[in-house]
Structures are given as structure tokens and as C-alpha cells.
Amino acid sequence: GLPMLLDRLEGLVAGSMRGWEILFVDDGSTDRTFAELLSASRARPWMTVLRHPTNMGLGTALRTGFANTLAPIVCSVDSDCTYAPERLPELVALVEAGADIATASAWHPGSVKAEGSPVRIALSRAVSGVYKLLIGQDIHTFTCLFRAYRRSSLERVHFWSNGFASVAEIMLRGMLAGYRVAELPMQLEKRRFGTSKLKVGDAIAAHVGLLALTASLVFATRTRRLLPRRSVA
């Protein structure tokens, strides 16, 4: 899938995304991905390639990417183009308008019907629905990687998940901290190349753990709000 992604990004950095820096985090690939990225970067000054020596998971890859940029607005994007990279400037505009986190939202009522694996779609919709009930805010999608973040807010979110649940954890911790989240209705498109690395069983286990953690954080937050303030003599 790299040739399609690179072609689309090439057009964007020459137009609406001029001046952007794009980091590629190779999470311990064992095929020719890293070699192809290095080769492509030689002719593309806007590309920076980072690599993990072994596969460490999506959450670790995100932390690596976040730690290696100083931009005031930081975006994360799926490399399989299941969300159109051409829409990244729309997410950035939402952050510039005041949001701390702007996310593509496949499950927003205003979005077009999603394409792709029925199992993955069902899992994502189900866990997003449970997180919505738990948090008690009108946000529809918690599992979408395609986002823009205000750096100053992102630096205060400490997330621990290493796998796919990390995406939801960042959102949940940000919302519990009072961050403003903006959703951009967007279609989840069908993957054109390769196969997803998500393992459904592992993802379910990770989200169950994250749900338990979130429930405890929500309880603690609400308890603090109910406690009377002590006066200081």
C-alpha cells in the first residue's frame, strides 16, 4: 500500500499541506517496508522515517511519533488510507478553532456507511457505544486513529496501552481531563492492500481492561466533584 499512500501525500504536501512534516514509524516490519520507506525518503524532504527493531504495538508507535515532532498540532493517520489523508486539513482546522482533539468519526450519524470487515466494524461500534455511555458525553467514535491533537494538550495525556486500545485510551483520558473533542463525520473506506494486524481476541481483552480502568477513573472523578471543600483556618 505504500505507493498509493506516498502518491497521495506527495500531492498534499505540494498543496493544502505545504510545509508539513510527515513521520513514518516502522513498527518492526519483517518485509521490505522499511527499505521502501528509506528509498522514498531520499527524494522527499518532508519525510522522516523512524523504526522499532521489533514489533512493539500501535501505542508504542504513537508514543515514538509524538516524541519526535515539535509541531503545535500533531496528527495521526492510518497508512492504509482507510480514511482519506486529503481530509487531514479539516481536522487541523477544528483544532485551530478550539478543539484539543479532532477525530474522524465513522459512527457519527452524519457519516457515510462504513466499508470493510464486518467483525472489525461491529467491534469498533460496540466499544465506542460502551465508552460513550460510560463517559456520558455525546461523542460517537473512540477507536479512530485518524486525528489531530493540540500538542500542549497531548503532552498532558499519559496513556499506557501498547496495542490498538491506545487510540481509545488517549481519547478517554483527554475527555476525563476536560479536553474539548470535535468529531468530523467521515467514511471508513475498504482496505485496498494487505490485511489488518488487529487480532480480535487481543483487542477485546484490551478494551475490557480499558473499560475497567475508565470506570474507576470516572468514579474517582465524580467522587472528587461531590466531596465538600475544606476550609483553611
Image: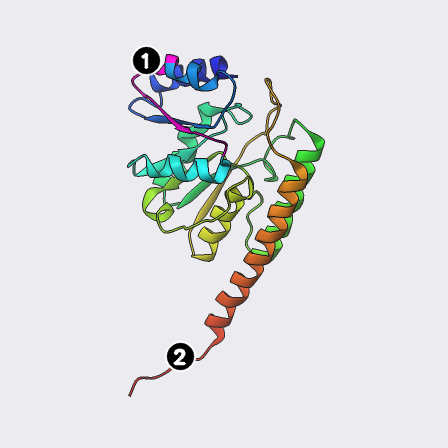
Q: Residue at image x 60%, y 54%?
A: 211
Residue furthest out toward the front: 53
Asked whether residue 132 appears in the rendered view, the answer is: no
The amino acid type found where label 1 is placed reads: Arg
The amino acid type found where label 2 is placed reads: Arg
Q: How is the image coloured?
A: rainbow
Residue furthest out toward the bottom: 233
Q: Residue at image x 61%, y 39%?
A: 107
Asked if residue 119 lies left or right of residue 111, the reply is right
Graded by Cα atoms within 10 Å as few (under 14), some (14 to 19) or many (20 or more), the crowding at tag 1 reads: few
Graded by Cα atoms within 10 Å as few (under 14), some (14 to 19) or many (20 or more), the crowding at tag 2 reads: few
Q: Nearer the viewer, residue 150 or 214?
A: 214
Image quarter of the C terminus: bottom left
Q: Which residue is mark 2?
A: 229
Q: Position of residue 171 (x, y in %)?
A: 49, 47
Determine whether 68 is above or below 153 in the image.
Answer: above
Q: Nearer the viewer, residue 100 or 108?
A: 100
Hey, which quadrant is residue 186 in on the image? Answer: top right
Q: Position of residue 170 (x, y in %)?
A: 47, 47
Report helix, strand or loop for mark 2: loop
Determine whether 116 is above or below 126 in the image.
Answer: above
Q: Nearer the viewer, residue 100 or 167?
A: 167
Q: Position of residue 110 (x, y in %)?
A: 59, 36
Q: Residue at image x 50%, y 28%?
A: 78
- Magenta span of residues: 39-55
Q: Which residue is mark 1?
A: 42
Which numbered mark, 1 or 2, is in the foreground of this view? 1
Asked if residue 37 lies left or right of residue 201, the reply is left
Determine whether 217 is above or below 165 in the image.
Answer: below
Quote the CA–CA distance across marks 1 and 2. 60 Å
Report helix, strand or loop for mark 1: loop
